[in-house]
Image (cartoon, rainbow, N blue to C red):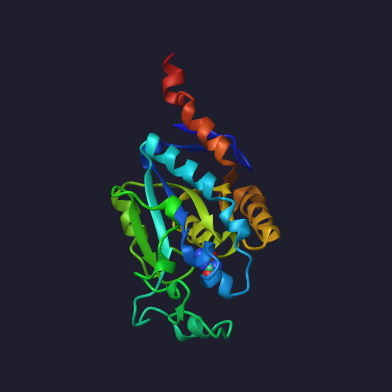
Amino acid sequence: MKTVDARPYPYRFDPARTAVLLIDMQRDFLDAGGFGAMLGNDVTPLRRIVPACVQLLVMARRHGLKIVHTQEAHDPQLADCPPSKKARGGLICGIGDEGPLGRVLVAGEAGADFVPELQPEPSDTVLRKPGKGAFHATGLDALLHAKGITHLLIGGVTTEVCVQTTMREANDRGYECLLVQDCAASYFPHFHDAVVEMVVAQGGIVGWAAPLAAVQAALAEPSTVEAALD
Ligand code: C5J
């Protein structure tokens, strides 16, 4: 077992039963011209976490953690997009419409793709999701169960929308979740900070939070089992 110096108290995990869940690091959220920018957001705070997310994936690959990339995108007929979602915001160029990065939030379009720095590798899992939470209308729970995953290290965008929704869904399903706080971002930095506090409040009501360096340090140390044998 590994132990992360986390809030509200140390987070223990077995790397063999732990996955990194990287939420929606797509051009539609991180690039000017994508869905996030169409909604009037400045994408800069999201772009800032890309190097840390690269390091998160490097760490996961080095230590054999499973990696799941989620992708918020709809099928080209928008059959999996509720009319309420398409109508929200009253955008001139909204979900399914032709934008600078192809059809907005549609699978297979440039905007739905991951940013170049965070392209999945063949051994990673890519999970397309129609909602904000990654468990809604997807096979994520079955997939994680099949791989014996009980613990999730979560990053991605945006902290208060898809990251937080997914973390709450996972928590309710019994997963032990740690928000890798510097690998997540919001267009509104104060929302990000508030989510971190919400997660760890009340004894970790939604889970744990820690910076990437704390997770890296935990993985670099001998496991508690090895240490006990010394
Ligand atoms: C949003 C997301 N914000 N990935 N999606 O619409 O957080």
Q: Position of residue 78 (x, y in %)?
A: 38, 81
Point 59% across, 41% down: residue = 211
Relative to residue 28, is residue 39 drawn left or right? right
Q: Check the image and report above or below for 227 versus 215.
A: above
Q: Indicate the position of residue 222 as horizontal and vertical percent values.
A: 46, 23
* Quadrant containing the C terminus in the rendered view: top left
The relative height of residue 83 versus residue 167 in the rendered view (above or below) is: below
The image shows residue 152 at horizontal and vertical percentages of 45, 48
Please, is residue 20 above or below residue 4 in the view? below
| Residue sticking out furthest to the top | 230
**Location of residue 59 with respect to 135 vertically, above or below:** above
Kindly identify the residue that appears in the image at 50 percent across and 51 percent down: 154
| Residue ID at (62%, 59%) | 44
In this orientation, which residue lies closer to the viewer: 18 or 9? 18
Q: Position of residue 178 (x, y in %)?
A: 53, 47
**Residue at coordinates 51% horizontally, 52% vertically from top-left?**
155
Q: Is residue 174 visible?
A: no
15 on left or right of 90: left
Query: Going by the picture, which residue comes out furthest to the right?
Result: 190
Query: Could you tell me which quadrant the N terminus lies in?
Result: top left
Q: Quadrant of residue 127?
A: bottom left
